[in-house]
Amino acid sequence: MNRRQPTAVSRRKGFTLIELLVVIAIIAVLIALLLPAVQQAREAARRVQCKNNLKQIGLALHNYHDTFNVFPPAICLTLSGADYGQWGPQARLLPYLDQANLQKLIDFSRPYDSQLAVVRVRVGTYMCPSEVNDRGSIEDGINQYPINYGANFGTWMVFNPVTGQPGDGAFGPNSRIGTRDFTDGTSQSLAFSEVKAFQAIIKEGGSPTAVPPASPQIVGGWSGNFEPDNGHTEWVEGRVHQNGFTTTFRPNSKVAHVDSGKTYDVDYTSVEEGDSTTNPTYAAITSRSYHTGIVQSLLVDGSVRSISENIDINVWRALGTRAGGEVIGEF
């Protein structure tokens, strides 16, 4: 009698639970290693775009200078206390940034808050890709767009309405500053630098003198009209807290101010330009960025530098002047 030989039973092979967990763990480690690299690559790309924005602003600034032999004024003041030209230098550079059609909508003889079709426009060249608040603002009850590149108004004093004297920077109220005025050298003077949108600010308070405050703690301890998100929210307005910066403190300095139990990093301006015919405007409007450890800055000669937040304060202030006579050296 024939006996049938037993046949081998085929068995499917698969992962055990332990093997599956090991594979998942390896994938998780690889992702953990890869993610920071991806984030760093993205930030590097944003930093390059930010630098390109400043280079475009530099080209526009020099094309404006070629046309008018001066840089644009920060703001045009009549000192009447009522009627003044509020438009900042960024608005006057528009035709040289391929934004001629936008500038054609502007009537510079009228206040910006009556020209809503202009103020709400996002000008891409004026926004850093690392800005976390790239959105419209509702300042003065109207829809406006913020800005990330402020003009250099100088060290501390921005405008003296009694003498009509602007600050010691590259821009100022009613100024007609040209390259001839930069006796420190155009490669040793700042033109624009990064600022953060929706910046907290103290206005119309404190105890300022002609001497810049020695530390951020002094300004942070002053009281006044506190606004948690007013600064650099209007790309069209030429006052220093909207369109500018000063070199009172080093880049990315923390100016800690406590309001209602919450600590804010603040800017400061003693009085808005044009609001007084007797009191000078002093301002500590710090250059800040979202790039770790640096701000990117445009020099008057058109070059763009990444400047460390640890730069010597005397060097930083010297870069803020156009004719201070300082010897800076490498920075």
Image (spheres, rainbow, N blue to C red):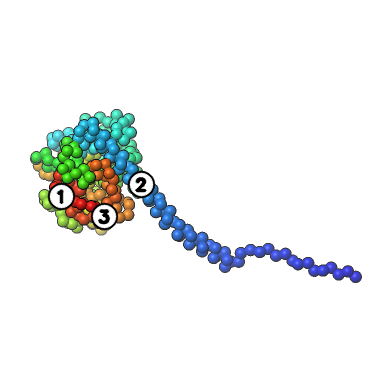
Q: CA distance from mark 3 to mark 2?
A: 18 Å
Whether the residues at callouts 1 and 3 have beta carbons within 8 Å, the answer is no
The CA distance from mark 1 to mark 2 is: 30 Å
Write the residue at 11% across / 49% down. 210
- In this view, the mark in front (1 or 3): 1
At a point 48% along the width and 62% down the height, the residue shown is 29
Lower position in the chain sequence, tag 3 or tag 2: 2
| Label 1 crowd (10 A; few <14 / some 14-19 / many >=20) | some
Give neighbour class at mark 2: few <14, some 14-19, many 20+ (Cα, 10 Å).
few
The residue indicated by pointer 3 is 309
- Say whether marks 1 and 2 touch (CB < 8 Å): no
Q: Quadrant of residue 176?
A: top left
Q: Nearer the viewer, residue 111 or 286?
A: 286
Q: Tag 3: residue type? A: Glu
Per the rendering, the mark at residue 326 is 1
Residue hosting label 2: 48
Residue 78, given in percent of the width and then of the height, sits at 14, 34
Q: Residue furthest right?
A: 1
Which amino acid is tagged 2?
Val
In the image, 28: left or right of 39?
right
